[in-house]
Image (cartoon, rainbow, N blue to C red):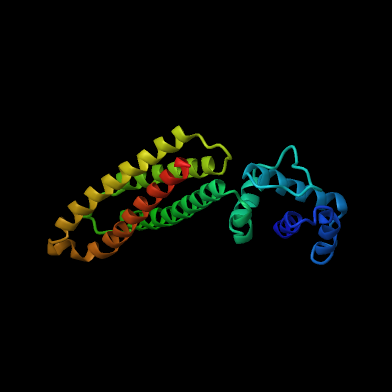
Amino acid sequence: MYVLLLRLQLHGADDRSEPLAQTLLSGALAQRNDAAIRYRMRNISAVVQELGAPILNDFSPAESVGRLVRPKIKAMLLEDTDFARILKPGVAGEADATSNARTALRILRDHIEDLERELAWRGHNGPPDQEDHSAERDQLQNALDDIGVIERELEKSNPDKEIVKSRTAKLLGLAVAFGKWLGERTTKFVDAALVAAAPVAVAKVTGLLPALVNAIEAVSKAIAH
């Protein structure tokens, strides 16, 4: 709704945003009072301004936006194709790169958590002669921590690039480590005694590696802007 009003304003209807907002919000949000509506619109203005786009004249940016509210508003704006057209070309490229990085990190997190569950299950239920996977699980947990740090930085209007780079380098180290892990286990799996244990672990690590590479590349492009 904010983006719709912004498009109208950009086309010359700059004195109509507040009455239009009241009209559009009179349905599903009829129970909200004027102050609540204005406060939410000003929250959106603050995030829109951070992204470098024009804001609605009737709703000046709020002085402070909640820590949990800001990323939600930002995500909704960046997913709006109409808003992407309003952004300046350079900012739009940055927004797209950041959005792609966040998506790649989310996919990577899913792969890591899936593999972590698999290794934990093997640690508790695998055959007695299976090797301990605690070291690998520790690496995966560290990677999840690194992803969390990178995600929090990317939510900021000015992320600390050095922090992002250092955490991304650690993810690259994980990719190298698991590439080696995969090579060693694949060789061992030729042994008939280990064939039964091979498919799931190998499949999950095989899927993890491209997800790691994609995330590293996406994050690097995001901070390059």
For residue 42, side relative to residue 183 (left or right):
right
For residue 127, side relative to residue 69 (left or right):
left
Q: Nearer the viewer, residue 103 or 6?
A: 6
Tally of marks = 0
Q: Nearer the viewer, residue 31 or 99?
A: 99
Give me the residue at 63% from left, 60% from top: 82
Q: Quadrant of residue 119?
A: bottom left
Instruction: Give residue 146's position: percent from left, percent from top.
Output: 43, 41
> In the orientation shown, which residue stands out farthest toward the front?
12
> In the orientation shown, which residue stands out farthest toward the left?
191
Give me the residue at 33% from left, 56% from top: 210
Quarter of the picture containing the N terminus is bottom right
Instruction: Give residue 83's position: percent from left, percent from top.
Output: 63, 56
Instruction: Give residue 127's position: percent from left, percent from top.
Output: 24, 59
Give me the residue at 70% from left, 57% from top: 3
Q: Nearer the viewer, residue 38 or 121?
A: 38
Instruction: Give residue 57's position: percent from left, percent from top.
Output: 79, 47
- 81 to 139, vertically: above or below: below
